[in-house]
């Protein structure tokens, strides 16, 4: 856990996390009751790295200048640690006043009474006039607004031009299919086998749950029902995992052992892999970690009807239902998603800003990462034909289990059939559970 300079105290020992998080919870740590005009202290938490932390700190400084009666304490963690911390807080009804929310966890926290319904503040404390309705509604469940999108993104297939030039392999071209992707991976892995370290075309793309959901949409299947149940079966997951069986069996994917050695970097950011699919706002991190600007984006592989992609809120801002200062929390959320200066500070590092005022405020320089991400989203807009799947309650758990089983599959410890059987057994208990 990272406690920034604004937070009260500091903690680095794992055993102290729960105590510190409770101390930094939604209670009133200011000098008075905000309803009576006294000072208010809010807490905010996010996942991310030091670069994101500096951007949040700069933005919150602006908020405090505009709201001298409000002090904001901040903290951040890496992705996995972040959700462990939030689960600990949720159990003690001490979630932060404002915190980053991922669509994967929205139903889990919203449907169990952990999140404030922000509906009563939309249009007042929270200015929603600049939002596209479809994007804003992605943060709502059964009429309750549990999250306000900060930004949007969509999936992309990244390729590292330096790596592909090194092994003499041409990148994929737009309109490529899943079969074309497999052929490219086999070619690149064969061409890079003699390098030290060896270069591969890709890691096993079937190991990411969101890519499975993308593939399902291309099959005409909405992954989840409106009432929060799974809408796919064992045969469909087996088919998706089977897309890569030949490459997996031939050892043509980036090895799981090497992936573990390089963590938290990936084979792609270590310049040992030519292609990697992810969300388009990862471009800045990819450029920074790999040390090259020669990284480009393509749409996802096409099914019979084309890529058929979807916009996903790259993240949302939510408020703990336990907050003692819900209106001030709403004001902080509104500032972070609407203020033009905040849009200029973050650029596309959290995804393309959800509100036009923030997009317009960005200093988009020719050839910059922001320009590249914006241009990519414009280029795939016609391919965004599907709505983002609203994950089921328990999504975070089933996504994590999918990742765990994918690692076991990569090590060769289980078969595809065992993967599917174990995942559905786990999901039967996890889906719909808090």
Image (cartoon, rainbow, N blue to C red):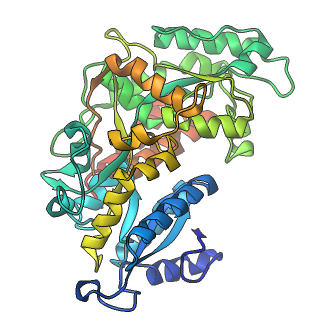
Residue 427 in the image: x percent, y percent? Answer: 34, 47
Residue 164 in the image: x percent, y percent? Answer: 72, 16
As drawn, 295 above or below 423 = above
Which sits in the foreground, 249 or 344? 344
Residue 247, quarter of picture: top right
Residue sitting farthest toward the bottom: 31
Residue 396 in the image: x percent, y percent? Answer: 40, 51
* Residue 47 visible in the shown view: yes
* Residue 411 visible in the shown view: no
Q: Residue sitting at 58 percent across and 40 percent down?
A: 407
Q: How many marks?
A: 0
**Horizontal side of residue 26 vs 290, given as left or right:** left
Which sits in the foreground, 217 or 328? 328
Quarter containing the N terminus: bottom right
As drawn, 275 above or below 46 = above
Quarter containing the C terminus: bottom left
Q: Residue sitting at 55 percent across and 75 percent down?
A: 6
Q: Residue sitting at 27 percent across and 47 percent down?
A: 392
Residue 95, quarter of picture: bottom left
**Horizontal side of residue 280 vs 286, given as left or right:** left
Which sits in the foreground, 373 or 212? 373
Which sits in the foreground, 125 or 294? 125
Q: Residue sitting at 58 percent across and 16 percent down?
A: 246
Residue 291 in the image: x percent, y percent? Answer: 75, 35
Residue 96, quarter of picture: bottom left
């Amino acid at each position: 856990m990272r406690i920034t300079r604004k937070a009260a105290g500091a903690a680095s020992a794992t055993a102290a996390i729960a105590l510190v998080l409770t101390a930094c919870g939604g209670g009133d740590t200011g000098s008075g009751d905000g309803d009576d005009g006294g000072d208010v202290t809010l807490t905010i938490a996010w996942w991310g790295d030091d670069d994101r932390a500096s951007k949040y700190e700069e933005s919150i400084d602006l908020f405090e200048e505009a709201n001298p009666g409000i002090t904001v304490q901040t903290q951040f963690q890496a992705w996995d640690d972040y959700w462990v911390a939030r689960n600990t807080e949720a159990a003690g009804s001490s979630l932060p006043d404002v915190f980053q929310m991922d669509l994967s966890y929205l139903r889990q926290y919203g449907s169990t009474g952990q999140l404030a319904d922000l509906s009563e503040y939309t249009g007042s404390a929270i200015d929603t006039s600049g939002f596209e309705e479809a994007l804003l509604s992605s943060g709502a469940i059964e009429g309750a607004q549990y999250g306000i999108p900060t930004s949007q993104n969509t999936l992309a297939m990244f390729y590292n031009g330096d790596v592909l030039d090194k092994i003499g392999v041409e990148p994929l071209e737009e309109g490529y299919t899943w079969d074309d992707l497999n052929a490219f991976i086999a070619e690149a892995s064969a061409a890079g086998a003699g390098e030290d370290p060896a270069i591969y075309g890709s890691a096993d793309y079937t190991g990411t749950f969101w890519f499975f959901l993308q593939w399902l949409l291309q099959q005409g299947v909405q992954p989840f029902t409106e009432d929060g149940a799974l809408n796919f079966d064992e045969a469909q997951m087996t088919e998706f995992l089977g897309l890569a069986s030949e490459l997996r069996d031939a050892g043509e994917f980036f090895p799981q052992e090497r992936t573990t050695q390089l963590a938290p970097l990936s084979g792609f950011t270590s310049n040992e892999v030519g292609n990697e699919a992810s969300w388009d706002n990862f471009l800045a991190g990819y450029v920074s970690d790999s040390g090259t600007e020669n990284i480009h984006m393509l749409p996802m592989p096409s099914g019979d009807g084309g890529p058929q992609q979807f916009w996903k809120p790259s993240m949302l801002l939510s408020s703990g239902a336990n907050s003692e200062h819900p209106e001030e929390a709403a004001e902080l959320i509104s500032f972070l998603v609407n203020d033009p200066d905040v849009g200029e500070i973050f650029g596309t590092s959290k995804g393309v800003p959800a509100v036009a005022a923030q997009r317009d405020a960005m200093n988009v320089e020719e050839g910059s990462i922001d320009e590249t991400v914006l241009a990519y989203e414009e280029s795939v807009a016609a391919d965004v034909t599907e709505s983002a799947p609203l994950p089921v309650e328990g999504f975070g758990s089933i996504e994590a289990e999918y990742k765990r089983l994918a690692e076991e599959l990569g090590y060769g410890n289980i078969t595809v059939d065992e993967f599917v059987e174990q995942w559905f057994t786990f999901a039967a208990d996890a889906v719909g559970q808090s």
